[in-house]
Image: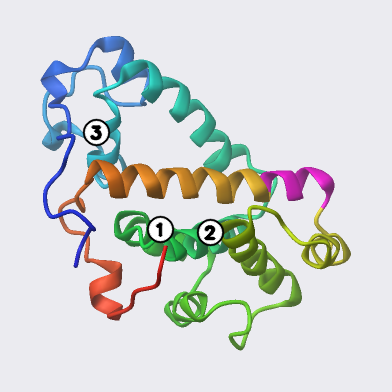
Amino acid sequence: MATLLDTPRVPPLELKDWSPELKNAMWFPKDAQNREDLPEMISKVFNVTATMANHPILAKNWNHFAMHIMGTNSLSPRLREIAIMRIGYLCQSDYELSQHAWISQFAGITEGEISNLIEGAEAPGWSPLESAVIQAADELKESNIISDATWYELEKEGLSVQQRMDLIFTIGQYNLVSWALNSLGVQLDEGLDSFLDVRHTTVGC
């Protein structure tokens, strides 16, 4: 399966065609002319960034918001990745899932827990707070609102108002990213295995 589209609708923009301003905004080395010139961590997410480079104004502003979600987010990295992986699975975004399967390891999420994320909030092993985070993603995807029961469960389990706001925006950001990745046909980066193919799993988006 890999991605929902076998070829990109919007091909990644070659680095030689990037402006210095765009490279700076996207945290790319200013003298980089091809993928081989990039640090490993940037190279691993090249395709999505280079696809966004086709629309520099959008790319710069989107990247600024993305830096909050991945950097200054008040959620713990573990809760952030649980939310991202769950919404990515609900949207069948193989690129998003394949990227965050390895990113989530740095947040302490195990391979077994990734399998439990596919199963959902009722899977064994989740704390009450983690189950509520998964439930929030499910409800936002299905009903466009977090239910009262889940909202107050998140509060009871210790999430502040700011953390609950960050949860909504984290889920929303990666729902949006899933739409973009799927619709633009962003292909998996080199060396990245298909999350969905490896696990032989699909769900309706």
Badge 3: residue crowd in 10 Å (few <14, some 14–19, many ≥20): many
- CA separation in Å, label 1 and label 3: 18 Å
Image marks 1 and 3: residues in contact by CB distance under 8 Å: no
Pointers 2 and 1 in contact (CB under 8 A)? yes
Is 25 located above or below residue 168 in the figure?
Answer: above
165 magenta-colored: yes
Residue positioned 83% across, 46% down in the render: 161
From the image, give the main secondary structure of the stretch colored magenta.
helix
Q: Which amino acid type corresponds to the residue marked 3 in the rendered image?
A: Thr
Start-end of magenta stretch? 160-166
Q: Quadrant of residue 17?
A: top left
Q: Which residue corresponds to mark 2?
A: 81
Q: Of tags 3 and 2, which is closer to the observer?
A: 3
Of mark 3 and mark 2, the one earlier in the sequence is 3
Q: Position of residue 179 (x, y in %)?
A: 38, 46
Label 2 is placed on what type of residue? Answer: Glu
